[in-house]
Image (cartoon, rainbow, N blue to C red):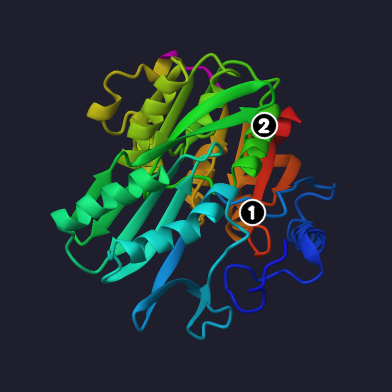
Amino acid sequence: MDCKYFGECGACRVYEHGYEAQLNEKVALNKKRFASYFSKDFSVYKSLDEHYRARSEFKIWHKGNDISYAMNHIDKKGVVLIDECPQVNVFIDKLMPKLLAAIKEYDIGLKLFGADFLSSSSGEIVVSLLYHRALDEAWQEKAKEIAQKLGIYIIGRSRKQKIVIGQDYITETLHVNRDVYKFQYIENSFTQPNPRVNEQMIAWACDKFSDMQGDLLELYCGAGNFTIPFAKKFNKVLATEISKSSIQAAKANMQLNDVHNIEFVRMSVEEFVDALEGVREFRRMKDIDIKSYSIDSIFVDPPRSGMGEYSCRFASRYRHIVYISCNPETLVEDLKILSQTHVITDMALFDQFPYTNHVEMGVKLIRKEMK
Protein backbone atom coordinates (compact mmCIF):
# COMPACT_ATOMS: atom_id res chain seq x y z
CA MET A 1 0.00 0.00 0.00
CA ASP A 2 1.27 3.44 -0.92
CA CYS A 3 -0.28 6.22 1.15
CA LYS A 4 0.70 9.87 0.94
CA TYR A 5 -0.16 10.29 4.63
CA PHE A 6 2.29 7.67 5.98
CA GLY A 7 4.20 9.21 8.87
CA GLU A 8 1.43 11.69 9.65
CA CYS A 9 -1.84 9.79 9.94
CA GLY A 10 -2.17 7.73 13.09
CA ALA A 11 -4.19 4.97 11.40
CA CYS A 12 -0.97 3.33 10.18
CA ARG A 13 2.06 3.04 12.45
CA VAL A 14 4.24 0.29 10.94
CA TYR A 15 4.80 0.99 7.26
CA GLU A 16 8.51 1.26 6.46
CA HIS A 17 9.76 -1.23 3.85
CA GLY A 18 6.25 -2.29 2.87
CA TYR A 19 3.67 -4.92 3.77
CA GLU A 20 5.92 -7.98 4.08
CA ALA A 21 8.31 -6.16 6.42
CA GLN A 22 5.55 -5.13 8.82
CA LEU A 23 4.13 -8.66 8.75
CA ASN A 24 7.53 -10.22 9.47
CA GLU A 25 7.94 -7.82 12.39
CA LYS A 26 4.63 -8.96 13.87
CA VAL A 27 5.48 -12.62 13.42
CA ALA A 28 8.88 -12.21 15.09
CA LEU A 29 7.38 -10.26 18.01
CA ASN A 30 4.70 -12.86 18.70
CA LYS A 31 7.00 -15.85 18.28
CA LYS A 32 9.07 -14.35 21.07
CA ARG A 33 5.95 -13.49 23.11
CA PHE A 34 4.60 -17.06 23.01
CA ALA A 35 7.92 -18.97 22.93
CA SER A 36 7.41 -20.51 26.36
CA TYR A 37 4.07 -22.00 25.24
CA PHE A 38 4.64 -22.91 21.58
CA SER A 39 8.01 -23.49 19.90
CA LYS A 40 6.79 -24.44 16.41
CA ASP A 41 6.10 -22.02 13.57
CA PHE A 42 2.79 -20.20 13.46
CA SER A 43 0.44 -20.49 10.55
CA VAL A 44 0.43 -16.96 9.12
CA TYR A 45 -2.56 -15.56 7.27
CA LYS A 46 -2.02 -12.41 5.23
CA SER A 47 -4.29 -9.52 4.44
CA LEU A 48 -4.73 -7.74 1.16
CA ASP A 49 -2.07 -5.06 0.89
CA GLU A 50 -4.64 -2.29 0.35
CA HIS A 51 -8.41 -1.73 0.27
CA TYR A 52 -8.91 -4.31 3.02
CA ARG A 53 -11.16 -2.48 5.49
CA ALA A 54 -14.93 -2.77 5.11
CA ARG A 55 -15.60 -0.60 8.15
CA SER A 56 -13.96 2.75 8.90
CA GLU A 57 -14.53 5.92 10.91
CA PHE A 58 -13.43 9.44 9.98
CA LYS A 59 -13.61 12.79 11.68
CA ILE A 60 -15.21 15.66 9.78
CA TRP A 61 -13.07 18.76 10.20
CA HIS A 62 -14.33 22.29 9.70
CA LYS A 63 -11.94 24.96 8.44
CA GLY A 64 -13.63 28.21 7.64
CA ASN A 65 -16.56 27.38 5.38
CA ASP A 66 -14.96 24.17 4.13
CA ILE A 67 -15.06 20.63 5.53
CA SER A 68 -12.66 17.71 5.14
CA TYR A 69 -12.14 14.18 6.35
CA ALA A 70 -9.58 13.97 9.14
CA MET A 71 -7.67 11.43 11.22
CA ASN A 72 -5.66 11.78 14.41
CA HIS A 73 -2.02 12.67 13.90
CA ILE A 74 0.42 9.82 14.52
CA ASP A 75 2.10 11.84 17.31
CA LYS A 76 -1.29 12.91 18.72
CA LYS A 77 -0.58 16.47 17.62
CA GLY A 78 -4.00 17.42 16.37
CA VAL A 79 -5.37 15.95 13.16
CA VAL A 80 -4.33 15.24 9.59
CA LEU A 81 -6.74 16.40 6.88
CA ILE A 82 -7.12 13.68 4.24
CA ASP A 83 -8.87 13.31 0.90
CA GLU A 84 -8.35 9.56 0.48
CA CYS A 85 -7.58 6.41 2.46
CA PRO A 86 -6.12 3.32 0.73
CA GLN A 87 -7.04 1.19 3.79
CA VAL A 88 -10.77 1.23 2.96
CA ASN A 89 -12.32 -1.07 0.39
CA VAL A 90 -12.80 0.17 -3.17
CA PHE A 91 -16.48 0.99 -2.64
CA ILE A 92 -15.85 3.24 0.36
CA ASP A 93 -12.83 4.72 -1.42
CA LYS A 94 -14.96 5.78 -4.41
CA LEU A 95 -17.79 7.03 -2.22
CA MET A 96 -15.77 9.27 0.10
CA PRO A 97 -15.21 12.27 -2.25
CA LYS A 98 -18.73 11.97 -3.68
CA LEU A 99 -20.30 12.00 -0.24
CA LEU A 100 -18.28 14.98 0.92
CA ALA A 101 -19.25 16.90 -2.22
CA ALA A 102 -22.93 16.04 -1.66
CA ILE A 103 -22.79 17.17 1.98
CA LYS A 104 -21.46 20.52 0.78
CA GLU A 105 -23.92 20.77 -2.13
CA TYR A 106 -26.97 20.03 0.02
CA ASP A 107 -25.63 22.13 2.90
CA ILE A 108 -25.99 19.53 5.68
CA GLY A 109 -22.52 19.97 7.16
CA LEU A 110 -23.52 22.22 10.08
CA LYS A 111 -22.11 20.70 13.30
CA LEU A 112 -21.29 17.45 11.50
CA PHE A 113 -18.28 15.90 13.26
CA GLY A 114 -17.99 12.32 12.01
CA ALA A 115 -18.71 9.92 9.16
CA ASP A 116 -18.66 6.15 9.71
CA PHE A 117 -18.70 3.78 6.74
CA LEU A 118 -19.87 0.15 6.71
CA SER A 119 -19.63 -1.73 3.43
CA SER A 120 -20.26 -5.21 2.10
CA SER A 121 -17.95 -6.90 -0.39
CA SER A 122 -20.54 -6.25 -3.09
CA GLY A 123 -20.70 -2.50 -2.48
CA GLU A 124 -23.77 -2.12 -0.26
CA ILE A 125 -22.96 0.78 2.08
CA VAL A 126 -24.40 2.38 5.20
CA VAL A 127 -22.95 5.75 6.18
CA SER A 128 -23.55 7.17 9.65
CA LEU A 129 -23.34 10.95 9.85
CA LEU A 130 -22.70 12.17 13.40
CA TYR A 131 -23.89 15.59 14.56
CA HIS A 132 -23.69 17.95 17.51
CA ARG A 133 -27.21 19.21 16.76
CA ALA A 134 -30.75 17.93 16.46
CA LEU A 135 -31.73 16.78 12.98
CA ASP A 136 -34.98 18.13 11.54
CA GLU A 137 -37.26 17.26 8.62
CA ALA A 138 -35.28 19.49 6.27
CA TRP A 139 -32.14 17.48 7.03
CA GLN A 140 -34.06 14.26 6.49
CA GLU A 141 -35.34 15.31 3.06
CA LYS A 142 -31.86 16.33 1.94
CA ALA A 143 -30.36 13.10 3.27
CA LYS A 144 -32.95 11.11 1.31
CA GLU A 145 -31.92 12.87 -1.88
CA ILE A 146 -28.24 12.21 -1.22
CA ALA A 147 -28.89 8.54 -0.43
CA GLN A 148 -30.84 8.09 -3.66
CA LYS A 149 -28.26 9.98 -5.70
CA LEU A 150 -25.32 7.95 -4.36
CA GLY A 151 -27.08 4.61 -4.00
CA ILE A 152 -26.37 4.25 -0.28
CA TYR A 153 -28.14 4.12 3.09
CA ILE A 154 -27.68 7.00 5.52
CA ILE A 155 -28.06 7.10 9.29
CA GLY A 156 -28.29 10.49 10.96
CA ARG A 157 -27.17 10.44 14.59
CA SER A 158 -27.22 13.10 17.27
CA ARG A 159 -27.88 12.98 20.98
CA LYS A 160 -30.87 10.67 21.64
CA GLN A 161 -31.65 10.67 17.92
CA LYS A 162 -31.24 8.13 15.13
CA ILE A 163 -32.80 8.73 11.72
CA VAL A 164 -32.62 5.84 9.27
CA ILE A 165 -32.67 6.59 5.55
CA GLY A 166 -33.36 3.23 3.89
CA GLN A 167 -32.00 0.64 6.35
CA ASP A 168 -29.40 0.42 9.11
CA TYR A 169 -27.58 -2.73 7.97
CA ILE A 170 -25.75 -4.30 5.05
CA THR A 171 -25.64 -7.97 4.06
CA GLU A 172 -22.17 -9.47 3.72
CA THR A 173 -21.31 -12.70 1.93
CA LEU A 174 -18.42 -14.78 3.28
CA HIS A 175 -16.77 -17.66 1.45
CA VAL A 176 -15.30 -20.24 3.81
CA ASN A 177 -13.69 -23.13 1.98
CA ARG A 178 -16.53 -24.30 -0.30
CA ASP A 179 -19.32 -22.90 1.84
CA VAL A 180 -21.08 -19.54 1.45
CA TYR A 181 -22.55 -17.64 4.40
CA LYS A 182 -24.56 -14.44 4.62
CA PHE A 183 -24.54 -12.08 7.57
CA GLN A 184 -26.48 -8.94 8.34
CA TYR A 185 -24.11 -6.36 9.79
CA ILE A 186 -25.91 -3.66 11.74
CA GLU A 187 -24.69 -0.07 11.87
CA ASN A 188 -22.94 0.88 15.10
CA SER A 189 -22.39 -2.75 16.17
CA PHE A 190 -19.23 -4.84 16.12
CA THR A 191 -18.23 -6.50 12.86
CA GLN A 192 -14.90 -7.88 11.70
CA PRO A 193 -13.33 -5.03 9.69
CA ASN A 194 -11.27 -7.18 7.31
CA PRO A 195 -13.62 -9.66 5.57
CA ARG A 196 -10.94 -11.61 3.67
CA VAL A 197 -8.93 -12.25 6.84
CA ASN A 198 -12.16 -13.00 8.67
CA GLU A 199 -12.85 -15.77 6.15
CA GLN A 200 -9.40 -17.21 6.86
CA MET A 201 -9.98 -17.08 10.63
CA ILE A 202 -13.29 -18.93 10.31
CA ALA A 203 -11.73 -21.55 8.02
CA TRP A 204 -8.82 -22.09 10.44
CA ALA A 205 -11.12 -22.42 13.46
CA CYS A 206 -13.40 -24.86 11.61
CA ASP A 207 -10.37 -26.93 10.64
CA LYS A 208 -9.27 -27.16 14.28
CA PHE A 209 -12.63 -28.76 15.02
CA SER A 210 -12.61 -31.02 11.94
CA ASP A 211 -12.21 -34.25 13.94
CA MET A 212 -14.48 -33.30 16.82
CA GLN A 213 -17.78 -35.01 17.58
CA GLY A 214 -20.77 -34.25 19.76
CA ASP A 215 -21.76 -30.69 20.61
CA LEU A 216 -19.98 -27.36 20.96
CA LEU A 217 -20.12 -24.61 23.56
CA GLU A 218 -19.19 -21.11 22.42
CA LEU A 219 -18.58 -18.12 24.68
CA TYR A 220 -18.62 -14.51 23.45
CA CYS A 221 -20.43 -15.50 20.25
CA GLY A 222 -21.28 -11.98 19.09
CA ALA A 223 -23.56 -12.02 16.04
CA GLY A 224 -22.66 -15.60 15.13
CA ASN A 225 -19.62 -14.94 12.94
CA PHE A 226 -18.03 -18.28 13.92
CA THR A 227 -21.12 -19.95 15.39
CA ILE A 228 -23.01 -20.41 12.16
CA PRO A 229 -20.13 -22.08 10.26
CA PHE A 230 -19.48 -24.28 13.32
CA ALA A 231 -23.04 -25.59 13.09
CA LYS A 232 -21.96 -27.78 10.16
CA LYS A 233 -19.25 -29.37 12.30
CA PHE A 234 -21.30 -30.32 15.35
CA ASN A 235 -24.61 -31.94 16.18
CA LYS A 236 -25.65 -28.91 18.23
CA VAL A 237 -24.10 -25.60 19.27
CA LEU A 238 -24.88 -23.70 22.47
CA ALA A 239 -23.65 -20.11 22.19
CA THR A 240 -23.63 -17.39 24.84
CA GLU A 241 -23.18 -13.63 24.56
CA ILE A 242 -23.94 -10.81 27.00
CA SER A 243 -25.01 -8.23 24.40
CA LYS A 244 -28.74 -8.23 23.69
CA SER A 245 -28.35 -6.64 20.24
CA SER A 246 -25.69 -9.18 19.26
CA ILE A 247 -27.90 -12.08 20.28
CA GLN A 248 -30.75 -10.64 18.22
CA ALA A 249 -28.42 -10.29 15.23
CA ALA A 250 -27.10 -13.83 15.73
CA LYS A 251 -30.61 -15.28 15.67
CA ALA A 252 -31.40 -13.31 12.50
CA ASN A 253 -28.20 -14.56 10.86
CA MET A 254 -29.04 -18.13 11.82
CA GLN A 255 -32.33 -17.82 9.95
CA LEU A 256 -30.63 -16.09 7.02
CA ASN A 257 -28.38 -19.13 6.61
CA ASP A 258 -31.16 -21.69 7.21
CA VAL A 259 -29.35 -23.14 10.23
CA HIS A 260 -31.41 -24.78 12.98
CA ASN A 261 -29.05 -26.57 15.39
CA ILE A 262 -27.88 -23.53 17.39
CA GLU A 263 -29.31 -22.23 20.64
CA PHE A 264 -28.28 -18.68 21.49
CA VAL A 265 -28.59 -17.45 25.05
CA ARG A 266 -27.91 -13.95 26.41
CA MET A 267 -25.70 -14.55 29.43
CA SER A 268 -22.36 -13.65 30.88
CA VAL A 269 -19.91 -16.46 31.54
CA GLU A 270 -20.57 -16.20 35.28
CA GLU A 271 -24.32 -16.47 34.79
CA PHE A 272 -23.93 -19.42 32.46
CA VAL A 273 -21.75 -21.31 34.94
CA ASP A 274 -24.32 -20.68 37.69
CA ALA A 275 -27.06 -22.02 35.42
CA LEU A 276 -24.96 -25.02 34.41
CA GLU A 277 -24.29 -25.97 38.02
CA GLY A 278 -27.79 -25.32 39.24
CA VAL A 279 -26.75 -22.46 41.50
CA ARG A 280 -29.30 -20.12 39.93
CA GLU A 281 -32.25 -20.47 37.61
CA PHE A 282 -32.64 -18.11 34.67
CA ARG A 283 -35.75 -17.53 32.59
CA ARG A 284 -33.43 -17.15 29.60
CA MET A 285 -32.47 -20.82 30.00
CA LYS A 286 -35.95 -22.22 30.58
CA ASP A 287 -36.30 -23.60 27.04
CA ILE A 288 -32.77 -25.03 26.87
CA ASP A 289 -32.23 -28.63 27.94
CA ILE A 290 -28.59 -28.35 28.99
CA LYS A 291 -28.49 -32.03 29.97
CA SER A 292 -29.14 -33.02 26.36
CA TYR A 293 -25.77 -31.62 25.30
CA SER A 294 -22.63 -33.73 25.02
CA ILE A 295 -19.87 -31.14 25.05
CA ASP A 296 -16.15 -31.86 24.81
CA SER A 297 -15.21 -28.76 22.83
CA ILE A 298 -15.38 -25.05 23.57
CA PHE A 299 -14.70 -22.01 21.39
CA VAL A 300 -13.93 -18.56 22.78
CA ASP A 301 -13.46 -15.19 21.08
CA PRO A 302 -13.31 -12.73 23.99
CA PRO A 303 -12.95 -8.93 23.88
CA ARG A 304 -9.56 -7.22 24.14
CA SER A 305 -9.60 -7.63 27.91
CA GLY A 306 -9.30 -11.40 27.44
CA MET A 307 -11.07 -14.12 29.39
CA GLY A 308 -9.67 -13.64 32.87
CA GLU A 309 -9.18 -16.31 35.52
CA TYR A 310 -12.83 -17.21 36.11
CA SER A 311 -13.61 -17.89 32.44
CA CYS A 312 -10.30 -19.68 31.88
CA ARG A 313 -10.96 -22.04 34.80
CA PHE A 314 -14.36 -22.79 33.33
CA ALA A 315 -13.00 -23.37 29.81
CA SER A 316 -10.39 -25.74 31.26
CA ARG A 317 -13.16 -28.25 31.99
CA TYR A 318 -13.35 -29.13 28.31
CA ARG A 319 -10.98 -31.38 26.38
CA HIS A 320 -10.65 -29.18 23.30
CA ILE A 321 -10.32 -25.39 23.35
CA VAL A 322 -10.06 -23.13 20.31
CA TYR A 323 -9.33 -19.52 21.24
CA ILE A 324 -9.36 -16.52 18.89
CA SER A 325 -7.74 -13.47 20.47
CA CYS A 326 -7.69 -9.86 19.29
CA ASN A 327 -5.10 -8.95 21.94
CA PRO A 328 -1.92 -11.07 22.26
CA GLU A 329 -1.03 -9.35 25.54
CA THR A 330 -4.12 -10.62 27.35
CA LEU A 331 -3.86 -13.96 25.54
CA VAL A 332 -0.49 -14.53 27.21
CA GLU A 333 -2.08 -13.95 30.62
CA ASP A 334 -4.90 -16.39 29.83
CA LEU A 335 -2.44 -19.03 28.60
CA LYS A 336 -0.70 -18.93 31.98
CA ILE A 337 -3.92 -20.42 33.38
CA LEU A 338 -4.99 -22.62 30.47
CA SER A 339 -1.53 -24.20 30.14
CA GLN A 340 -1.87 -25.67 33.62
CA THR A 341 -4.37 -28.18 32.25
CA HIS A 342 -3.91 -27.99 28.48
CA VAL A 343 -1.14 -27.96 25.89
CA ILE A 344 -1.06 -25.88 22.72
CA THR A 345 -1.11 -27.98 19.55
CA ASP A 346 -1.36 -25.18 17.00
CA MET A 347 -1.16 -21.39 16.74
CA ALA A 348 -1.99 -18.98 13.95
CA LEU A 349 -1.44 -15.27 13.33
CA PHE A 350 -4.04 -13.37 11.32
CA ASP A 351 -2.98 -9.99 9.95
CA GLN A 352 -6.39 -8.41 10.44
CA PHE A 353 -4.96 -4.88 10.86
CA PRO A 354 -2.07 -4.26 8.42
CA TYR A 355 0.36 -1.41 9.12
CA THR A 356 -0.52 -1.37 12.82
CA ASN A 357 0.84 -3.29 15.79
CA HIS A 358 -2.41 -5.23 16.15
CA VAL A 359 -2.98 -8.85 15.11
CA GLU A 360 -5.46 -11.61 15.86
CA MET A 361 -4.12 -14.90 17.21
CA GLY A 362 -5.62 -18.36 17.02
CA VAL A 363 -4.77 -21.09 19.55
CA LYS A 364 -5.80 -24.74 19.65
CA LEU A 365 -5.41 -26.44 23.04
CA ILE A 366 -6.02 -30.00 24.16
CA ARG A 367 -6.22 -31.30 27.69
CA LYS A 368 -2.95 -32.87 28.73
CA GLU A 369 -4.21 -36.40 29.29
CA MET A 370 -5.74 -36.32 25.81
CA LYS A 371 -2.54 -35.36 23.98
Residue 255: percent from the left, percent from the top? 40, 20
Name which residue lies at 51% across and 49% down. 307
Name which residue lies at 28% across and 44% down. 165
Q: Residue reaching furthest left?
A: 137
- The residue type indicated by label 2 comes to Ala
Q: Secondary structure at mark 1?
A: helix
Of tags 1 and 2, which is closer to the observer?
A: 2
- Which quarter of the figure has residue 241? top left
- The residue type indicated by label 1 comes to Lys
Q: Quadrant of the C terminus?
A: top right
153 relative to 262, above or below: below
Report the magenta residues as a range: 292-296
Q: Secondary structure at mark 2?
A: helix
Q: Is residue 6 magenta?
A: no
- Which quarter of the figure has residue 133? bottom left
- Which quarter of the figure has residue 104? bottom left
Instruction: Check if mark 1's residue and mark 2's residue have beta carbons within 8 Å.
Output: no
> What is the CA distance from the residue labelled 1 to the residue labelled 2?
27 Å
Name the foreground residue: 249 vs 296: 249
Residue 199: percent from the left, percent from the top? 63, 36
Give the crowd class for mark 2: few <14, some 14-19, many >=20 residues within 10 Å. Answer: some
- Residue 336: mark in rendering: 1
Q: Quadrant of the N terminus?
A: bottom right
26 relative to 261, above or below: below
Residue 240: percent from the left, percent from the top? 41, 34
Name which residue lies at 58% across and 63% down. 85
**Tag 2 or tag 1, which sits nearer the N-term?**
2
63 relative to 251, above or below: below
Residue 335: percent from the left, percent from the top? 64, 51
Res. 12 visible in picture: yes
- Residue occupied by mark 2: 203
